[in-house]
Image (cartoon, rainbow, N blue to C red):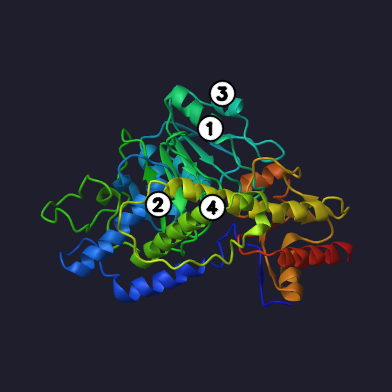
């Protein structure tokens, strides 16, 4: 038995590609001084890395606007708070869904106390939002639609194209939570406009913890900073600068963490190029060892290659498919067991990410998680997964929630077999 079988990638991807650790270490030792605060060469190099990471992320999401409108935050919770508190500061009405994470539910509930009108559109039994219901929930004073792109409970991926079209038709901005999708579901802002795209660095984007961001794609939206202070520009002005990215970034950035994202972006692009050389890899997920893909990378300051976006999209599709192969196998092994209930969708082929939750009839989820850890060294998360409304709807809020299983790109077939055997032993006990 291994020391750990990690099935909690919905919480954070672990481990990261080797190049992310290596580059963070080398950049932290060689270059990670305060970017943009001074004119000396080292500071400029640090700034170039940060700028280049914004440019690569712009290409990754196929955002054709100014990369300075991609602002760095601590995590997606920070990004979502920044957007919500800015757009909804004067109240009005907001439409969101029952599948949201507390990083949306809680800020909105707090704002509802001071007059914000709030509508939660309910998902169906599989965790999907009906676009017509979302449309009819909009009112004359709806200021924002907030949607969790991929559920961190059932894995359901919402129909972004249709939701984006509704927002365009109604002239209501869309704030998208991509915590569970960025890195496994290619998002193309050119084809599918999203006004505010929030991302977190430490999940599917393979960066470290402590870094996230917000793409302020709609330049008509005036976002106000959550914090003001030093930026390294216009120091004489007693007021905070209006220009991006400084407008929304006060204080020293998490440069070593941004270096991790920088390396991960290059890893995605190189992986995609490698996969594109051998299209058969895209058919047979196991023909190419994605997890073992370990190219050498260096600081990249040239404008991102034109094919960065397409290469990254190829890599994301391959990673998503690899992970869902594991989910399909787990679902197939558990679906007929009388003691196990799988929450949400069971069919293969629905639009989803590789996260699923189960309940075992005779054992609370927390006890199940403890036994999986103690007896089988399996890391999984039990409880409500910071998504209490989703659990309420799925009928698992009263019973300590569910057990969530989320394989990642480094999960092997043997890991999956170990998990299935352990779950079947406990289900039969
Ligand atoms: C859908 C969703 N939104 C937001 C978050 C919050 O992410 P972070 O803790 O990185 O801010 C998570 C984390 O699990 C999530 O799954």
Determine whether the residue tagged by mark 3 lies in a helix, strand or loop.
helix
For marks 1 and 4, the one nearer the N-term is: 1
Q: Mark 3 = which residue?
A: 136
Q: Quadrant of the C terminus?
A: bottom right
Asked whether the viewer can see residue 414, the reply is yes
**What separation in Å lies between label 2 and label 1 (alpha carbons)?**
22 Å
Task: Judge depth for marks 2 and 3 and give the one in front.
Answer: 2
Q: CA distance from mark 2 to mark 3?
A: 30 Å
| Rendered residue at 72%/38% (across/down) | 125
Question: Which residue appears at 16% of the width and 68% of the height?
Answer: 40
Query: Local crowd at mark 1 within 10 Å, few (<14), some, or many (≥20)?
Result: few
Mark 1 vs mark 4: in front: 4
**Nearest to viewer (mark 2 / mark 1):** 1
Find the distance from the CA under tag 3 to the CA under tag 4.
46 Å
**Residue at label 1?**
161
Can I make out residue 355 in this image? no
Disc 1 versus disc 3: nearer the observer = 1
Residue on which the image places disc 4: 277
Compared to residue 145, the image places residue 226 above or below, namely below
* Separation of residues labelled 1 and 3 (CA atoms): 17 Å
* Image quadrant assignment for residue 24: bottom left
Mark 1 or mark 3: name the one nearer the start of the chain: 3
| Disc 1 + disc 3, Cβ < 8 Å | no
Crowding near the residue tagged with mark 4, few <14, some 14–19, many ≥20 C-alpha atoms within 10 Å? few
Q: Nearer the viewer, residue 372 or 39?
A: 39
Mark 2 to mark 4 CA distance (whole Å): 32 Å
The residue tagged 2 is 213
Spot occupied by residue 73 in the image (x, y as percentages of width and height): 38, 55
Residue 315 image position (x, y, % from top left): 54, 52
């Amino acid at each position: 038995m291994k020391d750990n079988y990690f099935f909690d990638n919905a919480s954070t991807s672990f481990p990261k590609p080797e190049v992310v650790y290596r580059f963070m270490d080398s950049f932290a030792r060689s270059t990670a001084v305060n970017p943009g605060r001074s004119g000396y060469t080292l500071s400029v190099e640090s700034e170039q890395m940060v700028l280049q990471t914004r440019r690569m992320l712009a290409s990754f999401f196929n955002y054709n606007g100014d990369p300075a409108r991609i602002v760095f935050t601590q995590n997606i919770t920070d990004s979502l708070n920044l957007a919500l508190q800015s757009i909804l500061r004067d109240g009005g009405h907001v439409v969101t869904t029952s599948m949201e994470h507390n990083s949306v539910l809680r800020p909105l509930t707090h704002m509802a106390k001071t007059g914000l009108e709030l509508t939660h559109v309910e998902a169906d039994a599989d965790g999907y939002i009906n676009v017509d219901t979302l449309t009819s929930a909009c009112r004359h004073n709806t200021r924002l639609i907030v949607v969790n792109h991929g559920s961190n409970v059932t894995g359901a991926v919402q129909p972004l194209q249709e939701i984006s079209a509704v927002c365009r038709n109604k002239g209501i901005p869309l704030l998208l939570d991509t915590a569970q999708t960025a890195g496994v579901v290619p998002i193309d802002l050119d084809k599918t406009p999203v006004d505010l795209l929030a991302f977190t660095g430490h999940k599917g984007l393979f960066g470290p913890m402590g870094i996230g961001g917000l793409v302020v794609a709609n330049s008509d939206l005036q976002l106000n900073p959550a914090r003001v202070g030093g930026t390294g520009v216009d120091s004489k002005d007693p007021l905070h600068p209006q220009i991006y990215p400084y407008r929304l970034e006060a204080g020293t950035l998490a440069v070593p963490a941004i270096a991790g994202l920088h390396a991960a972006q290059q890893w995605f692009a190189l992986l995609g190029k490698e996969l594109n050389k051998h299209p058969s890899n895209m058919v047979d997920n196991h023909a190419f060892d994605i997890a073992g893909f370990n190219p050498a990378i260096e600081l990249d300051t040239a404008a991102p290659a034109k094919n960065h976006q397409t290469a990254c999209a190829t890599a994301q599709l391959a990673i998503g498919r690899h992970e869902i192969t594991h989910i399909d196998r787990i679902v197939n092994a558990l679906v007929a067991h009388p003691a196990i209930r799988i929450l949400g969708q069971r069919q293969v082929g629905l639009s989803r990410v590789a996260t699923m939750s189960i309940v075992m009839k005779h054992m609370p989820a927390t006890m199940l998680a403890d036994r999986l850890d103690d007896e089988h060294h399996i890391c999984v998360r039990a409880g409500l997964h910071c998504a209490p409304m989703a659990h309420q709807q799925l009928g698992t809020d009263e019973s300590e929630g569910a057990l969530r299983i989320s394989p990642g790109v480094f999960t092997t077939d043997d890991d999956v077999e170990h998990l299935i055997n352990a779950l079947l032993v406990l289900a039969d006990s």
